[in-house]
Image (cartoon, coloured by chain):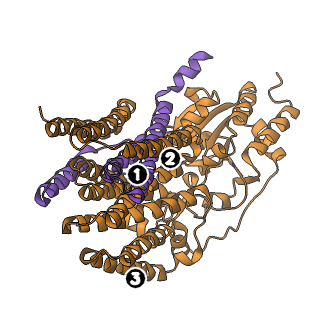
Chain colours: A purple, B orange
Amino acid sequence: MDFAQAFWILLLGSLLGLELIGKVPPTLHTPLMSGANAISGITMLAALTLIIQAKNNLPLLLIGSIALGFALFNVVGGFFVTDRMLAMFNRKPSKNSKLK
Amino acid sequence: MNITLIQSLINLLSVLFLALGIKGLSKVRSAREANRLAAFAMFLSVIGLLFYYLGTNGISQQSWLWIIVGSLIGSLFGAILAKKVPMTSMPETVALFNGCGGMSSLLVALGVVFFQKNQSLIQDLSISVSIFVGAITFSGSIIAMAKLQGWLSTPSWTQNRVRHLINVSIAIISLIAFINLLQSSDSSIIWLLVISSTVLGIGVTLPIGGADMPVVISLLNSYSGIAAAAAGFVVESQLLIVAGAMVGAAGLILTQVMCKGMNRSLISVLFGGTLASKSEKSSGGGEYTNITSCSVEECALTLEAANKVIIVPGYGLAVAQAQHTLREVAKILEQNEIEVCYAIHPVAGRMPGHMNVLLAEADVPYEQLKEMDIVNPDFPAADVVLVLGANDVVNPQAKSDKNSPLYGMPVLDVQEARTVFVIKRGMSAGYSGIKNDLFDLPNTSMVFGDAKKVLSELMSELKELGVGAK
């Protein structure tokens, strides 16, 4: 992968990110932040690559594995927690008053 | 079809889904599905990567072992924490997750720089960026978490102007290490960069007040995207670069949006210190002069005579887990034909929309929850307002005092009511650390104590008075 190409990708990715979010209702600030945070754990791909390319280099395998653990902690925890929050918003309180 | 092409297609699909996921997360109706779509996209990207290596060089057994161990442990802890953590401490949880993402990028860069030789200049550059941003994200997020958890307060020396000098010097040290790292990969320089960036993250985050923390976490979240993009350059993964850049940019926009919602600028959040330190300068000290404290009994007597009561719940109520007791008190009042409703500020609690959910859990009828714009004209007609664990959102300074750092923030006009009872643990300042003018007003009385305890005492007092006995 040559530098110019990688840089184009970086530029286009950033522009896409800037365009994605326009108006966000305040209710969704926290979930959106949490969801985007889970996505930033995509660095797990780098950790995976590191482990795969490590061959038999033990320290590198170890570092890669710890990095992978941290990243997946971020990803799995992040998506779960976002889902929990959004589930609470979806549960309309009107359902509660109907029960009564 | 060749393997590279298939992987490219999978990656393209992942990017598409991630983008749709972020977009969907900004709309209420599609948010939950969008979150799942993003999660699926992440899963897809892993499949693509494993598929590529299986089809080309193969993955050794040892690599598999380390992959499985690392991912199992990480996922397990992440899932457990996400399931167990109470809704009240959501912001600090996100901060912790974010810090770990930064740590991961940092570790990848360290692994490459220490154990893989023959890097190009581009790789050196991206390794340096990855270390720098990764370390700042990690230490900054951990500090943010500790402050939100209450493990760490804002030390007063950090409010001094000297802190800018210190932070700038640390930043210069990092920069020197950064540039040197491009020419040599001497381990001492690497460690210098790691340490100085970590300290810089602490130095920048520590002086920021609790009220601004959600904005800081959002910004740090954007950083972790940048760190991921840098890690993408290190391991030469296009997908990682796109996804990292996307999150970095989107995080920046979200930070901006959040700042606007709080009526603050990003610059003043980052470099302005806590709101309280500014208010001392602008509005002459934070001393209370006219505090009226009263007993639970007096409060009960006033409530008994009231016709209309408005309850203002805040974060303190959620922390004390008092929403059920509150509901009981409200029931007693209703039995005595007293009109009760709840005034919900848009940022009540620390998470928007948080308070509605907590009250719904305690079976508070939906019709009694009133949003700020609807309830504000009602306050002059109210006999009693009960403020429970809310502070900044009922501060009249936001409307009256142009010098106040809170000026312009939308607030509930509780002071318009005939009598205001503020149930509070003590005279400690609110989340922003600013003096609340409401407490000084003649129609405000303070009832000191834990919200749950006060409410259950209030309940027995009311019963003794015969309220709700009918």
Q: Distance between the residues labelled 2 and 3?
A: 37 Å
Q: Residues within 10 Å of mark 1 (few under 14, many from 20)?
A: some
Question: Residue B98 appears at what percent x and percent y?
Answer: 44, 53
Q: How far apart are marks 1 and 2 (CA)?
A: 9 Å
Q: Which mark is residue B169?
A: 3
Kindly state the secondary structure of the residue where label 2 is placed: loop
Amino acid type of the residue that numbered disc 2 sits on in the rendered structure: Val
Q: In this view, does B362 lie above or below B293?
A: above
Amino acid type of the residue that numbered disc 1 sits on in the rendered structure: Gly
Question: Residue A5 appears at what percent x and percent y?
Answer: 12, 55
Kindly state the secondary structure of the residue where label 3 is placed: helix
Specify whether B249 is left or right of B82.
left
Cβ atoms under marks 1 and 3 closer than 8 Å: no
Residue that label 2 marks: B347
The reply to whether label 1 and label 2 mark residues of one chain is yes
Amino acid type of the residue that numbered disc 3 sits on in the rendered structure: Ser
Residue that label 1 marks: B261
Front position in the image: A34 or B253: A34
Q: Which of marks 1 and 2 is nearer the N terminus?
A: 1
Location of the C terminus of chain A by quadrant is: top right
Kindly state the secondary structure of the residue where label 1 is placed: helix
Residue at 60% from the left image edge and 54% from the top image edge: B391
Front of the two marks 1 and 3: 3
Cβ atoms under marks 2 and 3 closer than 8 Å: no
Image mark 3: chain: B
